[in-house]
Image: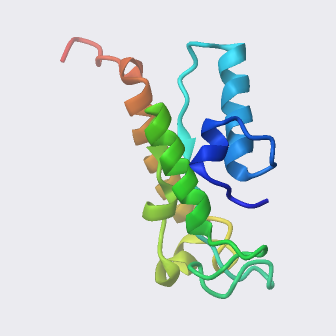
Amino acid sequence: MPPGTIDDYRNCATNGTFAARYRTLIDKIRSVNPRARIVLCTPRKGYGFNGYLPDHCDKQQPGGYLLKDYADIVYAIAELERLPVADFYRTCGEQDELAALSCDVALHPNAAGCRRLANILAKTLLLACPEAVSEPEGGK
């Protein structure tokens, strides 16, 4: 699906773009639990994978869009909604490190890649829910 624009999100568009569907998802979460804490995640870079993705993580994806276009929509939504972002796009490896962080050259993360994803997500979850950090027994 095309990434769409922040206006697709803002205006609750029904055009099937990534931004419009993100709005549908966030609206659904809020309708079920208006007090829900929401953390957005950008996509992790990847390349190759038997021709399914381009040969370089910064080249056009199938459909003619850049992965960065999708990450940019997530950033824009997060800014508009004042939501924290687990920024996998910018922090989970560039082209030259993806192979070392992936189990299949450059798409699915291996143990080191999962560790990096988990650390980024954990830090972002703590921003969203700082009260979840409990004091160690015996005080500070």
* Residue shown at the point (58%, 47%) measured from the top left: 6
Label tally: 0
Q: State left or right for residue 119 relative to residue 47.
A: left
Q: Is residue 136 left or right of residue 17?
A: left
Residue 71 in which image quadrant: bottom right
Q: Give percent across and percent down for residue 76.
A: 49, 47
Front residue of 21/93: it is 21
Q: Say which quarter of the image contains residue 34.
A: top right
The C terminus sits in image quarter: top left
Instruction: Specify whether 22 is left or right of 69.
Output: right
Q: Determine whether 84 is above or below 60 in the image.
A: above
Q: Residue at x 44, y 49 (%)?
A: 120
- Residue 30 at x, y = what percent? 65, 19
Image quadrant holding the N terminus, namely bottom right
Which residue is pictured at 53% across the width and 23% down the height?
A: 37
Which residue lies most toward the bottom here? Answer: 55
Residue 69 lies, in percent from the top left, at: 59, 64
Camera-nearest residue between 60 and 10: 10
Relative to 72, is 107 above or below?
below
Residue sitting nearer the eye, 40 or 140: 40
User: Residue 70: x and y, percent?
Assistant: 61, 59
Q: Is residue 104 above or below residue 16?
A: below
Relative placement, left or right, of 72 versus 108 is left
Q: Indicate whether 122 appears above or below 137.
A: below
